[in-house]
């Protein structure tokens, strides 16, 4: 989501830069040839700015808005988002291709581990959520059903088996939490 | 581009916030050396423009050109789909064998990428593949996107990809290596167990 928003914002910024650049050139040429400004009333803008002091209320309002918007943009970029791809295990021979990186699509990992957990008898409505950094991720599995620690252990084993088939790193932490349900399966 | 965009907007956000803080400080008269009664557009701005003479419009136009070029560069970067450029077609010189006619062999990278894609898809577990060749002619790098069937064990798939890379290496002048492989599983949602 942030990737798309950033790219769209980047495209808009780029178009804006091009427009402002060309506009500055056009206005300067018009000024040099002694014609009046084009498209915007630059003279009245200048007069207005020339009549405004730094202590003016408008300056304060605009400054506060700038702080709010600037901090919001900054926080949006600093916030950690769920990665779309997760690093998988290194290939068997580390010398053969030291740079080769195998990635797993996060949704695929979640879908497959959830399906694996659901294969345990009595466990249903399972959701798996991978989080953390792309190179150091964790898996949280939640669901309903099952009876106590036995079912949790079975789910954990099934999820680990599926992670191994997905060539996920062997040390991916997996947390399982099952809600007790009275539903008879 | 994603990381670069994140840095770009992070910097822009920080600069806008800092400008806002400076504005508030100046507005309240807390910024040392700045008179809060100063006008936003100083009276002597016209005089400064005249003092610069011919340089004033030249510098203004130059600034406009720089802004527009910066915008064009950013637009190009944002519209580019891949961070790394694809490998251009390479030309192989004919081996110098006595008594044989010489010649050149042009290697079309797109054809090689398509061939490797078909090679990868020969594995029934692989539903779809996308191959992109980047890097330098003497050291090509291959990026692969694979879509595998639900439930596929990826260990044999890795072996299949390695063998496909070996077969690709036989057709290329440089020794290609795998840069990265992204694996996804076919199908939209997790299969739901039907509960009676």
Image (cartoon, grey):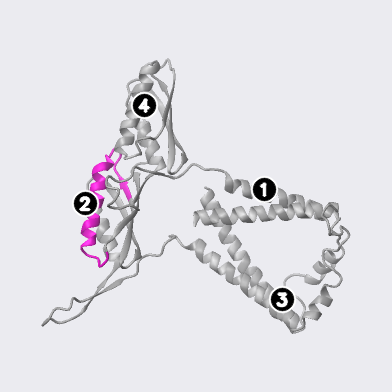
Distance between mark 2 and mark 3 Cα atoms: 62 Å
For disc 4, the chain is: A
Marks 4/1 same chain: yes
Q: Which residue is mark 2?
A: B122
Q: Position of residue B159 (x, y in %)?
A: 23, 47
* Residue depicted at 57% across the width and 59% down the height: A10
First reached walking from the N terminus: tag 4 or tag 1: 1
Q: Give the residues in magenta.
A: B146-174
Q: Can you tell which mark lies on residue A71?
A: 1
Q: Determine which quarter of the picture holds residue B44.
A: bottom right
Task: Give the camera-side residue of A67 and A99.
Answer: A99
Check disc 2: other Cα within 10 Å, few if <14, some if 14-19, many if 20+.
Answer: some
Please say if the residues under marks 2 and 3 sit with CB atoms less than 8 Å apart: no
Q: Nearer the viewer, mark 4 or mark 3?
A: 4
Q: Can you tell which mark lies on residue A27?
A: 3
Please say if the residues under marks 2 and 1 sit with CB atoms less than 8 Å apart: no
For disc 2, the chain is: B
Marks 2/4 same chain: no
């Amino acid at each position: 989501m942030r990737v798309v928003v950033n790219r769209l914002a980047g495209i808009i910024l780029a178009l804006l830069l091009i427009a402002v650049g060309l506009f500055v050139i056009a206005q300067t040429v018009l000024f040099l040839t002694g014609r009046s400004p084009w498209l915007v009333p630059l003279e009245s803008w200048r007069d207005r700015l020339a009549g405004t002091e730094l202590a003016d209320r408008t300056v304060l309002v605009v400054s506060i808005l700038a702080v709010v918007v600037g901090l919001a943009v900054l926080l949006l970029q600093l916030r950690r988002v769920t990665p779309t791809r997760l690093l998988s295990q290194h290939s068997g021979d580390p010398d053969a291709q030291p740079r080769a990186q195998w990635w797993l699509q996060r949704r695929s990992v979640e879908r497959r581990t959830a399906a694996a957990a659901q294969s345990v008898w009595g466990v249903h409505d399972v959701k798996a959520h991978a989080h953390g950094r792309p190179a150091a991720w964790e898996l949280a599995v939640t669901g309903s059903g099952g009876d106590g620690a036995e079912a949790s252990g079975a789910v954990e084993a099934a999820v680990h088996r599926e992670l191994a088939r997905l060539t996920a790193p062997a040390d991916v932490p997996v947390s399982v939490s099952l809600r007790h349900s009275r539903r008879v399966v | 581009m994603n990381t670069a965009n994140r840095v770009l907007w992070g910097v822009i956000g920080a600069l806008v916030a800092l400008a806002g803080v400076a504005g508030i400080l100046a507005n309240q008269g807390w910024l040392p050396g700045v008179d809060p009664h100063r006008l936003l557009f100083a009276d002597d701005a016209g005089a400064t423009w005249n003092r610069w003479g011919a340089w004033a419009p030249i510098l203004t136009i130059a600034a406009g050109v720089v802004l527009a070029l910066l915008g064009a560069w950013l637009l190009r970067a944002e519209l580019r789909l891949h961070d790394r450029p694809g490998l251009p077609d390479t030309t192989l010189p004919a081996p110098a064998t006595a008594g044989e006619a010489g010649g050149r062999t042009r290697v079309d990278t797109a054809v090689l990428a398509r061939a490797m894609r078909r090679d990868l898809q020969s594995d029934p577990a692989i539903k779809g593949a996308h191959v992109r060749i980047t890097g330098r002619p003497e050291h090509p790098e291959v990026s692969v996107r694979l879509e595998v069937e639900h439930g596929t064990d990826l260990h044999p798939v890795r072996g299949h990809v390695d063998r496909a890379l070996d077969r690709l290496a036989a057709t290329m002048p440089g020794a290609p290596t795998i840069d990265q492989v992204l694996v996804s599983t076919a199908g939209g949602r997790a299969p739901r167990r039907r509960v009676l």
